[in-house]
Amino acid sequence: MTRKLTEKKIVIATHNAGKLREIGDLMRPRGIEVVSAGALGLPEPAETETSFEGNARIKAHAAAAASGLPALSDDSGLSVDALDGAPGVYTADWAETPSGRDFAMAMEKVWQKLQAGGHAAPHTAAFNCVLCLAWPDGEDVVFVGRAEGALVWPPRGTRGFGFDPMFLPEGEAETFGEMDPARKHGMSHRADAFAQLTAACFG
C-alpha cells in the first residue's frame, strides 16, 4: 500500500525555476503549498548516482531531512537513441558553464554530436522523469515517466526550458518549447510521472 500524502505543505527539492514552476502548477489543484529547496536556503546535494532514480532519491531525502517536511524531487533528462542514451542523467551537466547553465550551448552540443556521428533523421529521443516523494522519517515512493519524440534543428520556441525547444513529441507539430504550457503539462514526461504519483498518493 503506497503511503498517502496528507500534509498540506511540501518542499520541492530543486533550485531550477522551470521545474519549480511546472511542479507547482501540477500541485496547486491539490491544495498543496509548495516551497523550493532554494527558497529555504537548503544546499544542493551532490548527485553521485548513475541513474535518474538514484539521484531523485538523494535530492528528496536531503530536502526532507533538512526541512522536516515531505519533499518531492524530480530527476529528469533527455536520452538520445543515436548517442546511446546520452546525455541522460548528465543532461544538466552538458549545459554547465562557469557562469551558470547554458542550454542553447547544450542543444548545440547534442546536435553537433549527431552530425559528427553521421546519424540520419529521425533523431529519436525521449524525456525521462523520476519523481521521488520522501518523508522526514526516511520512507519514500518513486514514479517513472517518459515522453517519446524526436529532435529538431534549429530549436523552436521560447516557452519551455532546458532541451524543450529541440524536442518534438511523438505525433505533434509543436516542440515542447513552442507548446502552450497547459498542453505540455498534459503529455510531458513529468505529467506522466505526476499522474502516477497523484493516483497513488492522493487517491
Image (cartoon, rainbow, N blue to C red):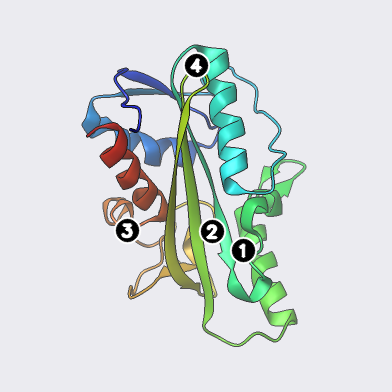
> What residue is disc 1 on?
107
Residue 197 at x, y percent in the picture: 34, 40
> What residue is disc 4 on?
136
> What residue is disc 3 on?
187
Q: Residue at the location (67% across, 70% down)?
A: 84
Query: Of discs 4 and 3, which sits in the foreground?
Result: 4
Asked which quadrant contains residue 34, the reply is top left
Query: If you read the primary sequence from the N terminus, does the residue marked by circle 2 or circle 1 appear first?
Result: 1
Q: Amino acid at mark 3?
A: Met
The local crowd at label 4, few if under 14, some if 14 to 19, many if 20 or more residues have their Cα within 10 Å, is some
The local crowd at label 1, few if under 14, some if 14 to 19, many if 20 or more residues have their Cα within 10 Å, is many
The local crowd at label 3, few if under 14, some if 14 to 19, many if 20 or more residues have their Cα within 10 Å, is some
Q: Amino acid at mark 4?
A: Pro
> What residue is disc 2 on?
163
Residue 185 at x, y percent in the picture: 32, 51
Query: If you read the primary sequence from the N terminus, does the residue marked by circle 4 or circle 3 appear first?
Result: 4
Compute the Cα span from label 2 to label 1.
6 Å
Compute the Cα span from label 2 to label 4.
32 Å
Query: If you read the primary sequence from the N terminus, does the residue marked by circle 3 or circle 1 appear first?
Result: 1
Q: Quadrant of the C terminus?
A: top left
Query: If you read the primary sequence from the N terminus, does the residue marked by circle 1 or circle 4 appear first?
Result: 1
Q: Amino acid at mark 2?
A: Phe
**Badges 1 and 4: C-beta atoms under 8 Å apart?**
no
Helix or strand or loop: what does disc 3 sit on?
loop
The local crowd at label 2, few if under 14, some if 14 to 19, many if 20 or more residues have their Cα within 10 Å, is many
Is 185 located above or below residue 25 in the figure?
below
Q: Which mark is residue 199?
A: none
Q: Residue at the location (33% across, 45% down)?
A: 196
